Image (spheres, rainbow, N blue to C red):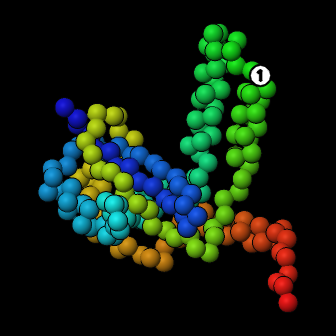
Amino acid sequence: MPENTKLTYMYRDASNNKSMRQVVFSGRLAADHKQSLIASMIPGENDEVANFIPGLVGLPDLQDKFYDQQITLINAMMEHASKDPVKRSDVDHKILGDFQALADDMAAVKPIWWPDDTTGHEILEIADTERETTDARSIQAFAAVVAVVDWDQDYLPPFHAEMLENYIEYLKNEEFDPPAP
């Protein structure tokens, strides 16, 4: 029987780029406590469970993490292919080089805070799990923090200034076509 609770959340920017994270807390939530936790968050839209600002409750904000999952996946695939003698003979070294170049290019992208970016993240799932914990808190301790937090809509993540500088640098380097007369 599952003894822990996983919370899956996602950041989606206005261009529909997405970055997800899953955190596992110790303990389980009864159904009524789960509803209480959700009610303490920012109401969700459409099919979202709820919204929240992770940086205000001790979880990582994801606005600067768009390529992290893809880079991790590419690196894992390349490592697996290089260690497996059967796969290594089937894998073209040029393809491995192309994947490495893709991962390097993704890692070199500087995250940008676009004018339409927000601080809100979507809660996708709160569910029981047998997975090991990834957060030192229990789900009850996390729920207690959520219950009393002030969802400050003016909050900015710690990396906001750097992302804003990247945006300004992007604008300086961007070539604009003058509007037609």
Question: Label 1 sits on what residue type?
Answer: His
- Which residue is most to the top? 85
Badge 1: few (under 14), some or many (20 or more) residues near its Cα, within 10 Å? few
What x and y, as percent, mark residue 19? 52, 52
Q: In which quarter of the image is the C terminus?
A: bottom right
Apparent side of residue 132 relative to residue 166 in the rendered image (left or right): left
Position of 34 relative to 46 (above/below): above
Q: Determine whether, in the image, residue 64 is placed left or right of residue 89.
A: left
Residue 69 image point, x, y percent: 56, 43
Would you identify the image quadrant in which residue 45 lies? bottom left
Foreground pick, 159 / 67: 67
- Which residue is depicted at the point 63% across and 24% down? 79
Q: How many marks?
A: 1
Which quadrant of the figure has residue 172?
A: bottom right
Q: In this view, does 125 lie above or below 13?
A: above
Identify the residue at image location x=55%, y=67%. Answer: 14
- Horizontal side of 113 relative to 46 (left or right) equals right
Q: Does the image show residue 159?
A: yes
Residues 96 and 142: in front is 96
Residue 57, visible in the rendered structure: no
Residue, far bottom: 181
Nearest to the observer: residue 18 or residue 33? 18
Q: Name the residue under label 1.
A: 93
Q: Residue at point 84% right, 68% down? A: 173
Disc 1 secondary structure class: helix
Q: Residue 28's spot in the image, x, y percent? A: 21, 44
Residue 146 picture quarter: bottom left
Name the residue furthest front.
Answer: 181
- Which image quarter is the N terminus in? top left
Q: Position of residue 123 (x, y in %)?
A: 37, 57
